[in-house]
Amino acid sequence: MEGESPSELRRRRGFQIRMWVGSGLFVLTFFALSAWGHQSTPWRWVLVVLPLIPFVWMVAATVLRVRQMDEYQVKLFFPGLAVGFVVAMLVSVVFGVLSSAGFAVPNGGWLICIAGVLSWQITNLFTGAPHA
């Protein structure tokens, strides 16, 4: 970003690297789960837990990044998180109601996640939130 201090640029790049590493590891472990997770072996439980480790890593990286932001950046950053959370909760309630009525929602968890993340990022575009 223009006018960014060297320390802020370093923090932002560090965050982006941590998120890319976490995302890449999540994708790899998820593919491993998809390929070998349907076998009835004790390793199945290891494969179930593996994708959660990079996810926890990304949550920790986000918390660390928010702690590094100044007051103004945090003020711009949180509306996107709030909107993403509300959208994810609304979609999960809709899926719960549909499920109670007997409608199947295949892969509903992924749809909830995608709705939350997309609404978070779209809100960030409108509020001018920092690129983390």
Image (spheres, rainbow, N blue to C red):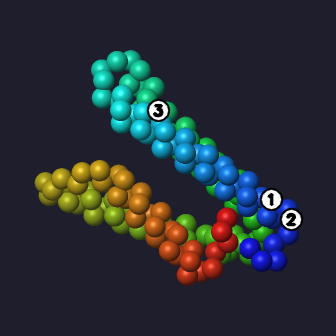
- The residue depicted at 56 percent of the width and 77 percent of the height is 125
- Marks 1/2 in contact by CB < 8 Å: the verdict is yes
The residues tagged by marks 1 and 3 sit, at their Cα atoms, a distance apart of 32 Å
The number of numbered discs placed on residues in the rendered structure image is 3
Q: Secondary structure at mark 3?
A: helix
| The quarter of the displayed image where residue 70 is located | bottom right
Residue type indicated by callout 3: Val
- The residue depicted at 30 percent of the width and 20 percent of the height is 40
Residue type indicated by callout 2: Pro
- The residue indicated by pointer 3 is 49
| The quarter of the displayed image where residue 43 is located | top left
Would residue 100 be seen by someone viewing this image from the given angle?
no
- The residue indicated by pointer 2 is 6
- Marks 1/3 in contact by CB < 8 Å: the verdict is no
Left/right of residue 38 with respect to residue 53 in the rendered view:
left
The residues tagged by marks 3 and 2 sit, at their Cα atoms, a distance apart of 38 Å
- The residue depicted at 41 percent of the width and 26 percent of the height is 45
Q: Secondary structure at mark 1?
A: helix
Left/right of residue 99 with respect to residue 113 in the rendered view:
left
Q: Between residues 25 and 117, which one lies in front from this camera angle?
A: 25
* Position in image of residue 6 (x %, y %): 86, 65
Q: Between residues 16 and 104, which one lies in front from this camera angle?
A: 16
- The residue indicated by pointer 1 is 10
* Position in image of residue 120 (x %, y %): 51, 68
Q: Between residues 11 and 75, which one lies in front from this camera angle?
A: 11
Q: Between residues 132 and 97, which one lies in front from this camera angle?
A: 132
- The residue depicted at 52 percent of the width and 76 percent of the height is 123
Would residue 24 be seen by someone viewing this image from the given angle?
yes
Q: Residue furthest top?
A: 42
Q: Secondary structure at mark 2?
A: helix
